[in-house]
Image: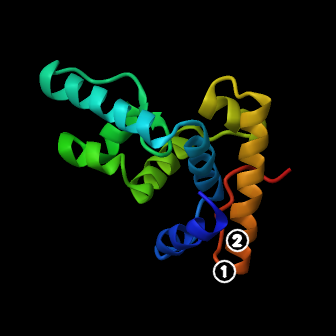
Amino acid sequence: MTIQTARPLLRRISAGGSINPYAIAFILTERTFRGPVVRVMELLYSAVLIFIGRSEPRITIGHSQVSFQFWRFCFGRRNSALLFGALSLEASYRVCCLYLEAHQPQSLRQMLICYNGKPSQLYASRFIENLNIVLTLAASMRIETARMLPSK
């Protein structure tokens, strides 16, 4: 996703008030590392487990690559809505915000480890780069950003 394609997303998300720049940066970063083919395969796998195996997947899904359990929390027992929601940038943003709020990281380093487990140097640098893009773009569009990390 480029700055040009991020602009409409920021506009849609900010319609509800301030945005969480970290959630958007995670979505931008995850989309770099997991292409659309892999995301569709994850959804197909999830659909097979849900509808045929009658069990819950233990994977991350969506543009934000958040654990299935957080998607379940947002969408309840509406399986089809959940799976189609994983294709939506806006739904991925909401689920990512929920995940970050649930874990309440105290530093950027802790946030990266909590979200990714063991982020590579490349992942961390892409995230920082995407966060800076989101913050710059939000400022130029006069969109308020929510503060997540404690000020030190």
Vertical placement of residue 136 versus 110, above or below: below
Residue 61, compared with residue 5, is above or below; it is: above
Instruction: Identify the residue at image location x=36%, y=38%.
Output: 40
Which residue position holds label 1?
Answer: 141
| Residue 112 at x, y percent in the picture | 69, 35
Q: What residue type is disc 2 on?
A: Leu
**Pick the front one: 117 or 18:** 117
Q: Position of residue 151 (x, y in %)?
A: 81, 53
Can residue 107 be seen in this snapshot?
A: no
Q: Are marks 2 and 1 in contact (CB under 8 Å)?
A: yes
Q: Which mark is residue 137?
A: 2
Q: Type of residue at label 1? A: Met
Please tell me whether mark 2 sits on a helix, a strand or a loop: helix
Which colour scheme appears in the figure? rainbow
Q: Which residue is depicted at the point 19% across and 44% down?
A: 80
In the rendering, at what x and y percent does residue 3 appear?
A: 66, 66
Q: Quadrant of residue 103?
A: top right
